[in-house]
Image: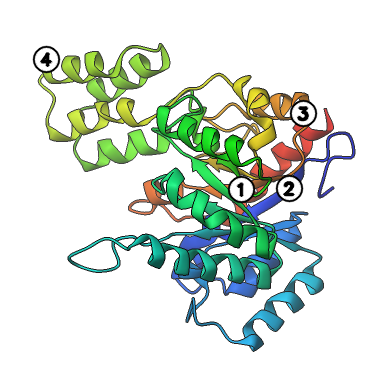
Amino acid sequence: MKSSAKSGIQRGVSLYSYQEEYFLRKLTLEQCIAQAAKIGALGIESIGEQMMPGFPNLSDAFYEQWRGWMQQYGTVASCHDAMLDTKKYKHRLLTDEECMVEFERDLRHAAKLGAKVVRVLCMVSPEIMVKAVPIAEKYDVKMGIEVHAPYYFDHPWIMRHLEAAAKLGTKHYGLVPDMGIFTRRLPRVHRDRMERLGATPKILDYVCQAYESGQLSEYVIFEARKMGGNQLDVAWAEQCRHSVNTNTKRLTEYMPYIFHIHAKFYEMLDDGTEYSIPYEKIIPALKAGNYQGFLSSEYEGNRHIQDAFPVDSVEQVRRQHAMFERLLAA
């Protein structure tokens, strides 16, 4: 089941999830697509800089091959992740005009892939987004600012974007929330890596418990120092500043602006649940808000285990999609 007949929510995979295997040449770009299709995913999200050699100067033959893969594996391009490298030059930032050239490039690329959404990094200003709207409308590709921790829906920066989008009244400017903004527990795989690096187990556990109970981040950092924490211990405590535990019900309030969802996860457990992020609450909230779009798997546990254990991104993504199927069918 690639989508839920009850809800219209569709399953997808960001190829970012397979970055370990792609980098180590265990999977080619086509094989990444094939793995996603094998578990019933419909949407394929891609990052040109990461998995498309030669990007942004891709040939017509590449796009023809891409569309061939989509047809062969029964998939569709769901989203292109744009980077907008404003620091491309050593001594200055890109001008607004240069940013528009970059947007034109990324939106044109998305259209050639067949993707209807471009994810835009949250550091891009509302002013730049407003200027890019006519380009998005020309290609009929929606631009979604990523709501990524430490940002959250009500953050002043995100509210500025929403106000700008509302003022324009366009359907081509909205949000791509990352489900990491619903982190209820700090990732266990990250905690364990910090211990391997030399952090103090007692302080690591204190920080985890303090975060889960909702203690103020500055207090947690203060306590970690007070406990005699070393540099790694304090760095772990500072994760409380960068992690966000938003109420999942907020999804329904912002649904009119949500184009696409990054289904972030760090560790799928043997019981079919994610350790840190409560999808058993997220998916009912999406259903309640009548979300129509993709849940695009984004596996980030790989970076926290690769120093000590083999990474099996394929299995982790498979487990997440088994969870999606179960929760979407409920």
What whole-number distance in Å separates the C-alpha atoms at marks 2 and 1?
8 Å
Q: Earlier in the sequence, mark 3 or mark 2?
A: 2
Q: How many numbered marks have been drawn onto this rendered protein structure?
A: 4
Residue type marked 1: Ser
What whole-number distance in Å separates the C-alpha atoms at marks 4 and 3?
45 Å
The residue that label 4 is drawn on is: 226
Q: Earlier in the sequence, mark 1 or mark 3?
A: 3
Q: Residue 11: give its label.
A: 2
Is label 3 in contact with label 2 (beta carbons under 8 Å)? no
Q: Earlier in the sequence, mark 2 or mark 1?
A: 2
Question: SS at mark 2?
Answer: strand
The residue that label 1 is drawn on is: 297
Question: SS at mark 4?
Answer: helix
In the drawing, does residue 136 fall left or right of residue 98?
right
* Residue 135 figure quarter: bottom right
Mark 2, Cα crowd under 10 Å, few <14 / some 14-19 / many 20+, is many
Residue depth check, mark 2 versus mark 4: number of the one nearer the observer:
2
The residue that label 3 is drawn on is: 287
Residue depth check, mark 4 versus mark 3: number of the one nearer the observer:
3
Residue depth check, mark 1 versus mark 3: number of the one nearer the observer:
3
Mark 3, Cα crowd under 10 Å, few <14 / some 14-19 / many 20+, is some
Mark 1, Cα crowd under 10 Å, few <14 / some 14-19 / many 20+, is many
Residue type marked 2: Arg
Residue type marked 4: Lys
Q: 319 or 245, which lies in front?
A: 245
Q: Say above or below: 259 vs 113.
A: above
Q: 9 or 291, which lies in front?
A: 291
Is label 2 in contact with label 1 (beta carbons under 8 Å)? yes
Q: Residue at x 65, y 49 (%)?
A: 172
